[in-house]
Amino acid sequence: MAITLIIEDGTIVTDANTYVDADEARLYASNRGVTLSADDDVVAVFIISAMDYLEAQRARYQGSKVAEDQALQFPRDDVYIDGISQDATTIPSILKQAQMRLVIEANNGVDLMPTRTGGFITEDTVGPITTKYSEKVDTSIEPNITAVDALLAPLFSVRSVGRFLTTYRA
């Protein structure tokens, strides 16, 4: 089954599901010493997983979608990178780089969005009765991908970044 990648180029492409294609991802990875699969479907799965990660950041992005019914979070209005207003008809290159970096991480076996599981209660006391349960080890650790965090930081609103203050000249 062939996976179809529909690239958002800033024109609000119907049913878009990525900002990059497999060839772009391969070139980006190759320039960083990583070889991705020659099978387009294998790379497409990583691209879609990376897109899922980026879409999950939606509450953190600056500005707002250009159109209410657009498939992806970008393009966006009112986005500033390094104090410079970004054209609402383009996809920021740092966003594409973040997606391709996530592809590399997925290729390396990182689960970009692991399912979080709750731990077991290890001890429960009700009145005079104490019950002890076996311990459960939580193996689902959310990845900390600093390269992606650094690429995405300028796209996040000031309130979501927390410790940084960005000012803009009007």
Image: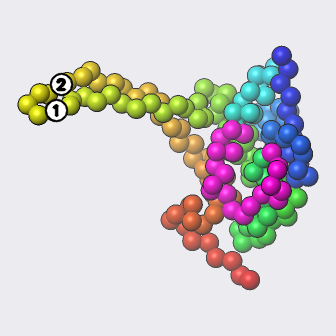
Disc 2/disc 1 C-alpha distance (Å): 6 Å
Q: Nearer the viewer, residue 67 or 95?
A: 67
Image x and y of residue 45, in percent: 74, 27
What residue is drawn where x is 55% and y is 32%?
Answer: 114
* Residue 80 located within the stretch drawn in magenta: no
Q: Nearer the viewer, residue 71 or 61?
A: 71
Q: Is residue 32 visible?
A: no
Three-letter residue code for mark 1: Thr
What residue is drawn where x is 64% and y is 34%?
Answer: 105
Give the secondary structure at mark 2. strand
Where does label 2 land, which residue? 131
Residue farthest bottom in this picture: 170
Identify the mark nearer the N-term, 2 or 1: 1
What residue is drawn where x is 82% and y is 59%?
Answer: 66
Relative vertical location of residue 134 with respect to residue 62 in this rendering, above or below: above
Image: magenta residue range: 51-71
Q: Nearer the viewer, residue 33 or 55?
A: 55
Q: Which mark is residue 140?
A: none
Give the secondary structure at mark 1. strand
Image x and y of residue 166, in percent: 62, 72
Where does label 1 land, which residue? 125
